[in-house]
Image (spheres, coloured by chain):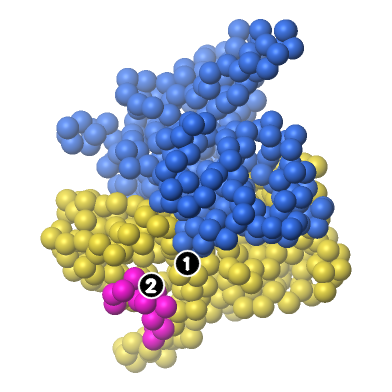
Chain colours: A yellow, B blue
Amino acid sequence: MLYVIGLGLGDEKDITLKGLEAVKRCDRVFIEAYTSLLSFGISSHGLSTLEELYGKPVTLADREMVEERADEILSQSKDSNVAFLVVGDPFGATTHTDLVVRAKKLGVEVKVIHNASVMNAIGVCGLQLYRYGETISIPFFTDTWRPDSFYEKIQRNRSLGLHTLCLLDIRVKEPSLESLCRGKKKYEPPRYMTIHTAIEQLLEVEQMRRESAYNEETTCVGFARLGSEDQKVVASSMRELLAVDFGTPLHCLVIVGETHPVEEEMLDFYSLKSELSER
Amino acid sequence: MLYVIGLGLGDEKDITLKGLEAVKRCDRVFIEAYTSLLSFGISSHGLSTLEELYGKPVTLADREMVEERADEILSQSKDSNVAFLVVGDPFGATTHTDLVVRAKKLGVEVKVIHNASVMNAIGVCGLQLYRYGETISIPFFTDTWRPDSFYEKIQRNRSLGLHTLCLLDIRVKEPSLESLCRGKKKYEPPRYMTIHTAIEQLLEVEQMRRESAYNEETTCVGFARLGSEDQKVVASSMRELLAVDFGTPLHCLVIVGETHPVEEEMLDFYSLKSELSER
């Protein structure tokens, strides 16, 4: 049996009782390391908190391993219980869907244990989840690659009065250009897009397009370390959010559409004004 | 402190370790009963599984109680620890946002503990969460009230190639017409919309509108008891889903938009064909 278990967003204690029981039944435990383990304070050397809770060793599975050695993980799942742990909910990322498809094709039984993900935890700011349009991803711009297909999606959502969740780029274990040239595997340090970078890129695209999808006065909600003990949520204009120190990653951003009174009341608690008066 | 704690979708063991620790710290524990407790097998007399796990009594809080006696719940939260348990994630329903707003206005500290909700657990069918448009709600039609504003939303989502999550009506503790007339509180038995009723209503609206937003050959995914041990997920045309026995509630429905190859591979496992060959 392959258990695909969501860990939630905060720390090791955000696993469900059902998830923990499943891990305890498993002979091998893998944890995916290609989206982000940041909120769990885990580096490749620091799985001990999880291992202590689970009472067994945990193997860090990066994208390479999951893509290249999936058959190995899956063949073990045929004869024994294997846990594959995922930060958030198991179906946040396409790669996990792919692993499940491969498992099912091999006739391996799969059991999914759900948990919170960014997609629902953003509800904490008070904007109703059913009033969101299509979710967008903002990739890191480079000198030569500045894709802006998210612009039309934001435009569309806003014209319908809908909110837009912006997922910000994460670059983990990217092979360095130098290593690609030399044929040796060496990796760039991980990079996580901040709310500042996201807003700067958004405003740059608006300046190029000039179709008024949004501007620096548009209300947004910035989320840092969502679901963690030290999460930070601030609602304000893009311009003002550029001055807010959100601290360490992960960050994400919501561009606010039309709001209902109960949404506004809740957003007010996260406004820069409330933020300042709390200090 | 008011702890607003998501219970997840399955049973009592879908609470997180963090959530359980919080409940154990609390002097009073309320559980909301106005969306649905069905998946937890709880009637108003049957909280014992939860109470056993928590080691303390749990008070069932229906909509009336939360709306009328919120101040009582909140004043207790000022001086002691109070848990307010919610099926799924705390911010699935507007009513919970309202409770948090009232708490914050009274200066009560609020801590939210997230969990899985329908909004992310539908990811299990393989359709990517970022490819959904606006979520719609389908209300029970009556002889005189057949609101169809969801039609334009589905139309819009489909014209953009996006999937549509349809939340199906739940009627819990609705005062009966007779009781309203007599001024006595008496309630209708709870009603939960099935996938069949939803599809029938959808097709009825299409027949009235005739704008080809969808038809009985449109692929949908029906989910029953999502996140529970006995969940049932079937992907097929509306017409074929009408012949599937989904069993007891809760049900929800996804109208499929344009699909990517990895989405199709995963949907295939839930097709009626796979479903039949499993028997």
Q: Chain of mark 2?
A: A
Which residue is disc 2 drawn over?
A53
Is residue B120 in view? no
User: In the rendered image of this protein, does residue B50 appear above or below residue B113?
Assistant: above
Say which mark, if any, is on residue A13. 1
| Residue range of the region highlighted in magenta in the rendering | A44-57
Q: Position of residue A249 (x, y in %)?
A: 59, 75
Q: Residue A82 in the image: x percent, y percent? A: 24, 63
Taking the spot 59% from the left edge, 48% from the top edge, the residue there is B29
Q: Are marks 2 and 1 in contact (CB under 8 Å)?
A: yes
Q: Where B244 sits versus B79, above or below?
A: above
Q: Mark 1 belongs to which amino acid?
A: Lys
Q: How many callouts does the rendering have?
A: 2
Pointers 2 and 1 within a single chain:
yes
Q: Chain of mark 1?
A: A
Using a 10 Å C-alpha cutoff, classify the residue at mark 1 as few (fewer than 14 neighbours), some (14 to 19) or many (20 or more).
many
Badge 1 marks a residue whose secondary structure is helix
B220 lies left or right of B266: right
- Amino acid type, residue under disc 2 in the picture: Leu
Q: Which of the 4 image quarters holds residue B61?
A: top right
B34 vs B191: above or below: below
B156 drawn magenta: no
Of residues B19 and A178, the one drawn nearer to the viewer in this rendering: B19
